[in-house]
């Protein structure tokens, strides 16, 4: 995640300690863990990475198995457990498991479509201590309903958001940007303000699950730049108007480089602060600072990468699996720069991007180490920091 609020406005926000204060080497990092607690979902989104439907799926972790897994996360000192799906609120023991996780010291988050959140459910979410609820919207009105595969989904999700806000629960929007919906961005900005929503994450499309089938609906490189410009302008406008909201982009670390270069000439002091924050963040964290456990207990590098597993929490504790670098993929992901190909291998910004998303490279090139096709930086841009970085290196070598 890249916080535009932090980069452009220097305002503290939820998650800053995880994004900018990680001191441990990659092999020792404790990841945020996404758990697909159920694959069942009451919607059928066109870009769903888990390809979920409203049906029962066999082999999902039982309550006892889930508690054993959660305890292993706490023992490993994982900082956050994110309940995802499918639709996590369809799992009957989700509240019981949240309380169990909270009692063990884990921060808990839910990623939901919001359509099931009645006033009663919102009050229970608040009283049971969930730290944050992310509600997915992918457009306004009928546009969202088209993405979600259900007429009325937008109104139901908006009702859920309002119920959460009324209950005093920390809530945010999750918006996946595509060719089909980026025209709704101004309306999404306005909705976030009028509905008193404190946080919004703009996700780039990842080609996984049903998202692979709509990869051609990803934004062009020119459109990606235009969208980031709009988001930056809005984040700065919020600060100027004294409105406190957190604005983030997710799943494309080219955004950070683009924003740095955007201000490098016009505001070099701001650009340097942006660069320092991005270096502290370290870029894509699949297999390092983010992990996924699927419904059947298999551990993956991230929630989009279900075709590769490091092991199963039914067989081994999570911490043992996550630190086992005898697995070649795990070992390479934790120190991946030397394996990257194409544009990534030539880029001077690997320390703030870390090769971006390997799943997209695999989907397009059938090679996980190829360049991320969603990177919209030009050859001139990825080479633009050579001279300044050489100067910094010379200063380090001279002990300055």
Image (cartoon, rainbow, N blue to C red):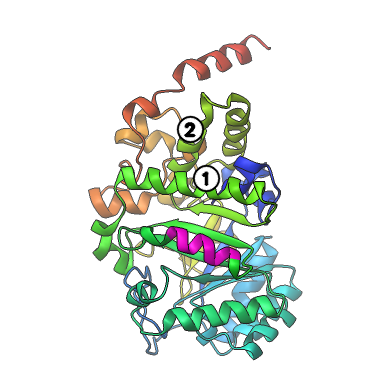
Q: CA distance from mark 2 to mark 1?
A: 10 Å
Question: Dot 2 corresponds to which residue?
Answer: 262
Indicate which disc residue 232 carries: 1
Q: Which residue shows up at 47% across the image and 39% down it?
A: 353
Quick one: SS at disc 2?
helix
Q: Position of residue 314 (x, y in %)?
A: 52, 75
- Image-quadrant location for residue 99: bottom right
User: Does residue 33 show up magenta in the picture?
Assistant: no
Quick one: SS at disc 1?
helix
Q: Position of residue 39 (x, y in %)?
A: 42, 80
- Image-quadrant location for residue 100: bottom right
* Image: 73 above or below 153: above
Q: Position of residue 147 (x, y in %)?
A: 34, 72
Q: Residues within 10 Å of mark 1 (few under 14, many from 20)?
A: many
In this rendering, position of residue 161 left or right of residue 366: right
Magenta residues, dominant SS class? helix
Q: Position of residue 68 (x, y in %)?
A: 62, 77
* Image: 220 above or below 118: above
Q: Which residue shows up at 46% across the image and 63% down it?
A: 187
Is the Cβ of the residue at disc 2 closer than 8 Å to that at disc 1?
A: yes
Mark earlier in primary sequence (2, 1):
1
Q: Which residue shows up at 36% across the image and 32% down it?
A: 345
Magenta-colored span = 185-193
Return the residue nearer the eye: 203 or 86.
203
* Image: 146 above or below 245: below
Q: Residues within 10 Å of mark 2 (few under 14, many from 20)?
A: some
């Amino acid at each position: 995640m890249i916080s535009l609020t932090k980069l452009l406005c220097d305002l503290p926000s939820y998650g800053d300690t995880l994004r900018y204060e990680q001191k441990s080497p990659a092999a020792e990092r404790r990841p945020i863990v996404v758990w697909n607690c159920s694959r069942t979902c009451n919607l059928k989104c066109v870009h769903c990475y888990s390809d979920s439907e409203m049906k029962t799926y066999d082999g999902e972790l039982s309550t006892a198995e889930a508690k054993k897994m959660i305890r292993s996360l706490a023992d490993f000192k994982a900082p956050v457990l994110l309940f995802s799906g499918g639709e996590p609120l369809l799992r009957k023991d989700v509240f019981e498991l949240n309380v169990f996780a909270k009692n063990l010291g884990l921060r808990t988050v839910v990623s939901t479509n919001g359509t099931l959140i009645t006033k009663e459910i919102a009050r229970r979410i608040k009283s049971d201590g969930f730290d944050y609820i992310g509600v997915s919207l992918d457009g306004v009105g009928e546009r969202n309903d088209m993405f979600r595969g259900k007429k009325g989904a937008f109104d139901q999700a908006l009702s859920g958001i309002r119920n959460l806000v009324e209950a005093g629960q920390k809530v945010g929007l999750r918006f996946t940007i595509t060719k089909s919906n980026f025209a709704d961005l101004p309306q999404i900005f306005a909705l976030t303000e009028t509905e008193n929503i404190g946080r919004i994450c703009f996700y780039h499309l990842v080609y996984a699950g049903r998202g692979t089938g709509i990869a051609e609906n990803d934004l062009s490189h020119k459109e990606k730049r235009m969208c980031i410009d709009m988001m930056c302008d809005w984040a700065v406008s919020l600060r100027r108007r004294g409105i406190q909201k957190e604005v983030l982009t997710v799943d494309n670390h080219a955004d950070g480089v683009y924003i740095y270069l955007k201000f490098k000439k016009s505001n070099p002091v701001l650009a340097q602060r942006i660069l320092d924050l991005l270096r502290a963040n370290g870029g894509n964290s699949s297999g390092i600072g983010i992990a996924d456990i699927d419904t059947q207990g298999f551990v993956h590098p991230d929630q989009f990468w279900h075709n590769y597993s490091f092991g199963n929490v039914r067989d081994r504790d999570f911490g043992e699996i996550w630190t086992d670098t005898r697995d070649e993929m795990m070992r390479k992901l934790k120190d991946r720069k030397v394996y990257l190909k194409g544009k990534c291998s030539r880029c001077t910004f690997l320390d703030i991007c870390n090769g971006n998303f390997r799943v997209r490279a695999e989907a397009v090139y059938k090679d996980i180490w190829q360049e991320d096709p969603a990177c919209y930086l030009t050859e001139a841009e990825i080479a633009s920091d050579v001279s300044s970085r050489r100067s910094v290196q010379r200063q380090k070598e001279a002990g300055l």
